[in-house]
Image (cartoon, coloured by chain):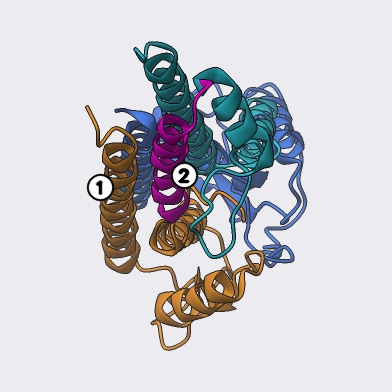
Amino acid sequence: MQTAMSAMTAMTAAASSATSVNGAAGAFSGALNSGAASSGPAPTPFASLLTDAVGQVNSLEGQARSAVDGLMQGTGVDVHQAMIATQKADMAFELALAVRNKAVQAYQQVMGLQF
Amino acid sequence: MGMEIETRLSDQIARYMDLAASEAKLTAANMANIDTPGYSAVGMNFGVEMQRAIQDVNRGAAPEPVQVETVGGLVARPDGNDVSMDRESLNLADAQLKFRTGVAMLRIEYQKVMDAIHADK
Amino acid sequence: MNLFGVMETSGSAMEAERMRAEVVAANMANAETTRTATGGPYRRQMVVFAADRGDPNFLNSMQEAGNAAAAALPPLPPLPGTQMPGAQMGDAVAPGVHIAQVVQDPSAPLKRYDPGHPDAGPDGYVEYPNINPLTEMVDLMGATRAYGLNGSAVQAEKSMITSALDIAKA
């Protein structure tokens, strides 16, 4: 949850830094690649944050799949364990999706800026 | 920096449900063997196991197998069987309620995470 | 073993208890049977329960129980003695129960003087099964109660599985 918050702050930082520079699209891609928040103590590149999130979604999805497999093959996986794994994967996916939507929204906002 | 979708509490609740399921398993085994000569009822110490599970979650360790012990102090019938119908019924109801409590708490916990994700809508 | 395995545990007990009730019913039905395929009067039968060994391969023991039951019921297997094998608990938890054997009551048949009976011996006595209806009724009640207990256990397990499905419900 904390990471979700920091992702959002990073996004707003990216958006605000983009407005201060002319050539908005370039600035945004720069923010994506080289780290967004210049004011933060330990700047994490937003791109790596996203990659991280996708990787996490992937691994949780894999866990959920193996749990459901185990449940169906009767290898001792319990129903609630499979459901918990599925729910975790679902939540991670929702989080990644929300972050991605925000990113796209910010990008479109920046692209729509009038000078 | 990793993305942690699960909270410590939700992991602990998951272990709580595992233990409740184990309790149901032991109770069902006892109930099934209510007429088996020489069978002694088995059980577990839920409190001790939960304590251990909480510590495991805090250390980030994998779940440990449950310690199963024979329940002492029960009145055995002439054939050596000491399963008590009342005790097992009670234990099963207990396990069932614990499990349902776990489901309810887990749903609240997950709903919180979901609400945080969709906080801007 | 997961919660479905627990249902199988309770199911094995229900099956075993049903077998026990069947044997009791056979005893009651044959309380006056003086003629059987093996000769002599019907002999009272009893079931012997045994805990399944704590192996994860649950199907085998269920099959064993089924086979033993099928082999035991209609034709009477001559089983010497009523030795009760001590229940063996597996490594951890018994994954169910099965009927280890159906034994015959070794006690002598009751003799009633009835020279006109076609099955009467040369001394005029007819051998009747040594069956006490009261004992059988008590046995039947025990079987019914244990059957109901395990039935309610199945119910509980079912509700646990159903509530586990709610976890992923939004």
Element at badge 1?
helix
Q: Is residue C121 visible?
A: no
Rendering coords of residue C146 (x, y %) = 37, 48
| Above/below status of C119 relative to B69 | above
Q: Amino acid at mark 2?
A: Ala
Task: Identify which residue is drawn at 42% across, 88% down.
Answer: B73
Q: Among the chains, which one is orange? A: B
Task: Identify which residue is drawn at 35% across, 63% down.
Answer: B88
Q: Nearer the viewer, residue C14 or C121?
A: C14
Q: Nearer the viewer, residue C1 or B35?
A: C1
Task: Identify which residue is drawn at 57% across, 40% down.
Answer: C5
Magenta residues (range):
A1-23
| Residue holding disc 1 | B108
| Above/below status of C157 relative to C55 | above
Q: CA distance from mark 1 to mark 2?
A: 28 Å
| Residue holding disc 2 | A10
Q: Residues within 10 Å of mark 1 (few under 14, many from 20)?
A: some
Task: Chain A: give its colour.
Answer: cyan
Quarter of the figure with residue A101 = top left
Is A21 one of the magenta-colored residues?
yes
- Quarter in which the C terminus of chain B is drawn: top left
